[in-house]
């Protein structure tokens, strides 16, 4: 049980760091396009914005439904709750796969 809690905490931290990194990189790269509006979206901006769009679900949908500002302390809490949800679900999936693999061994 303790190992599952540690795994969930590690996966939550990894998810949170990857999500924050993708959001920051996406905004940093997109900021340069404001100076030249005719420039095209680059590969890094496209990739990080798509990855962050996936990683911030499902809490982003709830946040949009409730019309809560994404930036600020409440938005950060939603982002952290989202990472906790992802960490718990990845731990559950890993546990189920491990249980299934162990049940196949005779």
Image (spheres, helix red, strand yellow):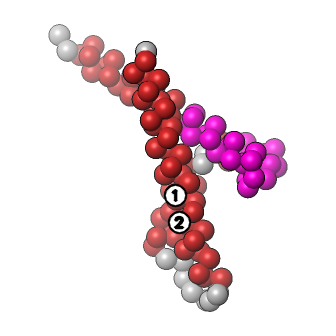
Does residue 82 belong to the magenta stretch?
yes
Res. 64 in view? no
In the image, residue 73 sits, relative to residue 22, either above or below, namely: above
Residue at 57%, 71% (x, y): give it. Answer: 28
Quadrant including the C terminus: top left
For the residue labelled by badge 2, is the local secondary structure a helix, a strand or a loop? helix
In the rendered view, does 99 fall on the left or right side of 34? left
Q: Would you name the residue on which mark 1 appears?
A: 21
Residue 70: assigned label: none
- Residue 54: horizontal and vertical position, in percent? 55, 51
Highlighted range, magenta? 61-86
Q: Which residue is mark 2?
A: 25
**Which quadrant: the N terminus?**
top left
* Circles 1, 2 touching at the beta carbon (< 8 Å): yes
Is residue 55 in view?
Answer: yes
- Determine if the magenta segment contains residue 12: no
């Amino acid at each position: 049980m303790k190992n599952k809690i540690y795994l969930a905490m590690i996966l939550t931290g990894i998810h949170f760091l990857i999500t924050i990194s993708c959001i920051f990189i996406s905004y940093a790269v997109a900021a340069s396009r404001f100076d030249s509006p005719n420039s095209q979206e680059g590969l890094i901006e496209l990739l990080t914005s798509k990855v962050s769009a996936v990683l911030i679900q499902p809490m982003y949908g709830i946040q949009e439904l409730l019309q809560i500002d994404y930036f600020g302390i409440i938005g950060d809490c939603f982002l952290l709750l989202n990472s906790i949800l992802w960490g718990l679900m990845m731990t559950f999936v890993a546990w189920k796969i491990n249980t299934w693999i162990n049940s196949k061994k005779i």
